[in-house]
C-alpha cells in the first residue's frame, strides 16, 4: 500500500472515530456517525399524532387493533392505508369492502387473540401531548373519527 493510500485510510478512520467521540461528548446523535438511538433522549415536551384502527365490542368499549387482530397485515401500515383509501375518489365502496375484509380477518384470527366479538370498526386520527421526560398518558388528548363501519351481527 502506498503512503498516500495509507494516509487516506487513516484519515477516514480518524474522522469516523472523531465523529463518534464528538457525538459522545455532546451527548447527541449525528448521522452518519450514529445510525441507532444510542444516546437519544425523549423530547421534553411536544405533541404526537397518528392514525389508528379501533374496534368496538358489544358493550360499546373501544379497543385498538393490535398485531394479532389483523394478522398477517402489518398493524402499523393498516390505518395509514385505510386513511389513504378514505381520500380516494371512490372511497365509500373501497372502504366498505376493506372494512368487510378486515372484520372477517378479525373473526378468523379470534383463535389467536381471544378478543371480544367485534361490533364496529373505526379509523381514528388521534393526537396527544407529551409531558416532560415523556411521561405521557396512554390515552390521547383528542381523537377524530375519520370513518366508521358497523359490523353485521354474526351468531356466536
Image: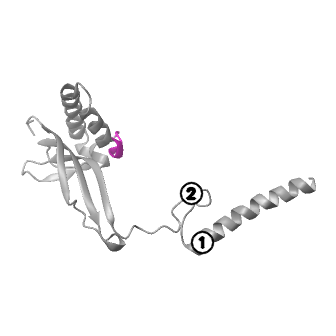
Q: Does residue 22 lie above or below 5 as drawn?
A: below
- As for residue 46 lying within the magenta part, the answer is no
User: Foreground residue, 101 or 87?
Assistant: 87
Q: Is mark 2 on a helix, strand or loop?
A: loop
Report the Cα–Cα distance between label 2 and label 1.
13 Å
Residue 74: say if magenta: yes
Mark number, residue 117: none
Which residue lies at the image location 66% right of the left edge and 65% below the top edge?
A: 19
* Near-viewer residue (129 or 71): 129
Badge 1 density bin: few <14, some 14–19, many ≥20, Cα 10 Å: some
The residue wearing badge 1 is: 24
Q: Where is residue 102 in the image (x, y as percent from the top left)?
A: 24, 36
Q: Residue 16, located in which quarter of the rendered image?
A: bottom right
Q: Residue 42's spot in the image, x, y percent?
A: 41, 67
Seen in the image, is 150 located left or right of residue 112?
A: left
Residue 104 placement (x, y as % from top left): 21, 34
> Would you place residue 141 above or below residue 56 in this image?
below
Which residue corresponds to mark 2?
Answer: 35
Mark 2 vs mark 1: which is more N-terminal? 1
Taking the image as shown, residue 36 lies to the left or right of residue 8, namely: left
Q: Residue furthest right?
A: 2
Find the magenta span and give its range.
Answer: 72-77
Quadrant of the frame with the C terminus: top left
The colour scheme used here is one colour
User: Badge 2: how crowded within 10 Å, few (<14), some, or many (20+)?
Assistant: few
Secondary element at tag 1: helix
Amino acid at each position: 500500500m502506498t503512503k498516500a493510500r495509507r494516509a487516506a485510510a487513516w484519515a477516514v478512520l480518524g474522522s469516523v472515530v472523531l465523529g463518534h467521540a464528538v457525538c459522545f461528548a455532546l451527548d447527541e446523535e449525528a448521522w452518519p456517525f450514529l445510525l441507532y438511538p444510542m444516546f437519544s433522549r425523549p423530547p421534553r415536551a411536544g405533541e404526537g399524532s397518528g392514525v389508528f384502527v379501533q374496534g368496538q365490542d358489544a358493550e360499546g368499549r373501544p379497543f385498538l387493533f393490535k398485531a394479532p387482530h389483523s394478522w398477517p397485515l402489518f398493524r402499523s401500515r393498516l390505518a395509514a392505508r385505510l386513511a389513504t383509501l378514505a381520500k380516494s375518489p371512490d372511497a365509500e365502496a373501497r372502504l366498505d369492502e376493506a372494512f368487510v375484509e378486515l372484520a372477517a380477518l378479525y373473526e378468523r384470527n379470534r383463535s389467536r387473540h381471544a378478543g371480544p366479538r367485534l361490533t364496529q370498526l373505526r379509523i381514528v386520527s388521534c393526537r396527544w401531548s407529551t409531558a416532560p421526560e415523556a411521561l405521557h398518558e396512554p390515552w390521547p388528548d383528542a381523537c377524530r373519527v375519520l370513518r366508521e363501519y358497523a359490523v353485521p351481527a354474526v351468531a356466536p
